[in-house]
Image: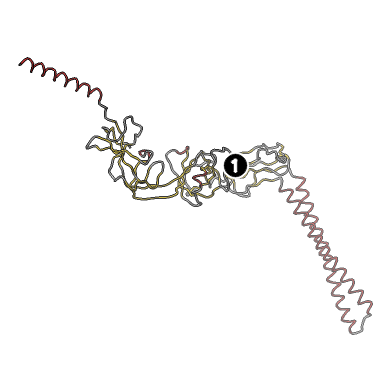
Amino acid sequence: MARRILRWTLLAAVVAVLVFFIWRATRSEPVEVAVKTVTLGLVERTVANTRAGTVKACRRAKLSPSVGGQIAELPIREGDQVKAGQLLLALWNEDLQAQVLLAEREVEAASSRARSACLKAAVARRNADRLVQLRQKDVVTEERTENAVAESDALEAECRARRTEVRVIESKVAVARANLERTRLTAPFDGVIAEINGELFEFVTPSPIGIPTPPAVDIIDNNCFYVSAPIDEVDAAGIRVEMPARITLDAFRGNHFEGRVRRIADYVLDFEKQARTVDVEVAFSQPGRSDPLLAGYSADIEVILGVRRDVVRVPTEAVLEGRRVYLFLPQHGRLAARTIRSGLSNWDWTEVTEGLAPGDLVVVNVDAPGLKDGAAAVQLQEAP
C-alpha cells in the first residue's frame, strides 16, 4: 500500500514538472511597448505640399536690350546692390546721341522762327486794329484797311504753323530719345544683380521671335520672398487666401517661419494625370528677418485650416485603422484596445473627443509583434 502511494506521488510530481516546463516553454513573452501620455494641448488641422516647393522673389526681372549692339558701359558686377533707375548696361549709341542733339537744335531753330512769326503777327494785328478804327472815322480807305486785316490774319496763321512745327520737331526729339533709351538698361526696382550674361565690348542681339536667349542682366528684389508649392487638388479645395501657414526650409533645418497664403492658382496642373495639384503661394509674415534667404531654396508649406486649443490629444502615430488605440495598463501589465472618437488631426496630434482621458498611456510602436487586446506587456520607456 505504501509503495502504491509513493508510486502515485512520484507520478504526480513528474506530471506536474512536465506541465510546468510545457507551460513555460509555450507561454508568450510580454510585449515590449513604447508609450506616450495623453495630454491637453493644441491640435491643428493642416494640409501640406505633395512635392517640394521653391522660394521665389516677389520681384525678379530678366532684362535685355531691345536692340542689338556693342556693350559700351557695364558698371555692375554680380552680387551688386542697385537702386531703382541705376544704369546697368549701355550699348554704343553715339549716333543716337547725335540724332537727339540734332533734333534739339532743330527745336531751338523752329522756336526762334515761331517767335519771329508771332511777333510780326502781333504788330500786324495792332496796325490792322488801328486802321479799322480810322476807317470808321472815314480817315483811310476801305481797301487799305482790308489789306491790313488780311495781312494780320496771314501772319497769325503763320505763327500758328510755326508753333505746330515746333511741336512736330519736339516729337522727333522724343522719338530720338526713345531710340537712345533702347540702348540702355536701368534697374526697375531696388535689388541685387543675380547674373550677367555679357562682357564689355561684346555684341548682344535681341531674342528672335519664339527663341528665348539668356537675359543680359538678371535682377532680384532680395527684400521680399514667398514660397510656391504644389498642393493635392483634394486638399487645395479647403485653402483660402490669408490663411496662416508654416514654412520650413532644408537650408534652415529645425526652424519654422510664419506665413500667410497670398495666392491660389486658378487652374489645376495635370502633368501627372494621377497626381493633379494646385500651386499655392505663401508669403513670409516677417520679410525683414535676419535669415539670409535666397531665391531657389527648396521649401515646404503647411497651411493651417483649423485650430483647437486645450483639447485632449493623442499622438497620431498611435491611432490605428478604425480609430483604435492600445492603452498600456501598468498596474496590470496588460494592453487594452480602445475605440476613440476623434476631431481635428495632423501628422503629429489627433484630437480625442471621446474614449481617452489625460494621463492615459497609449502605445506608439503599433507595429510591435504580439500587440493585441489583453496581451501581457512591459514598458520599454515613455517615448519622447
The image's colour scheme reads secondary structure
Q: Dot 1 lies on which element?
A: strand
The answer to which quarter of the image holds residue 295 is top right
x then y, percent, for residue 311? 34, 49
Q: Position of residue 323 (x, y in %)?
A: 36, 41
Q: Label 1 belongs to which residue?
A: 193
Q: Residue furthest left?
A: 2
Quadrant where the N terminus lies?
A: top left
Left or right of 341? Residue 135 is: right
Within the image, what quadrant is residue 325 found in? top left
The residue sitting at the top extreme is 3
Residues 228 and 257: in front is 228
Amino acid type shown at disc 1: Ile
Name the residue located 85 percent from the left edge and 72 percent from the top edge. 123
Is 82 above or below relative to 378? Answer: below
Q: Quadrant of the C terminus?
A: top left
Residue 166 horizontal side relative to residue 350, left or right: right
| Outermost bottom residue | 137
- Residue 102 position, x and y percent, is 79, 52
Number of callouts = 1
* Frontmost residue, 190 versus 6: 6
| 337 in relation to 44, above or below | above
Q: Residue at x 57, y 38 (%)?
A: 273
Determine whether, in the image, residue 336 is placed left or right of residue 321: left
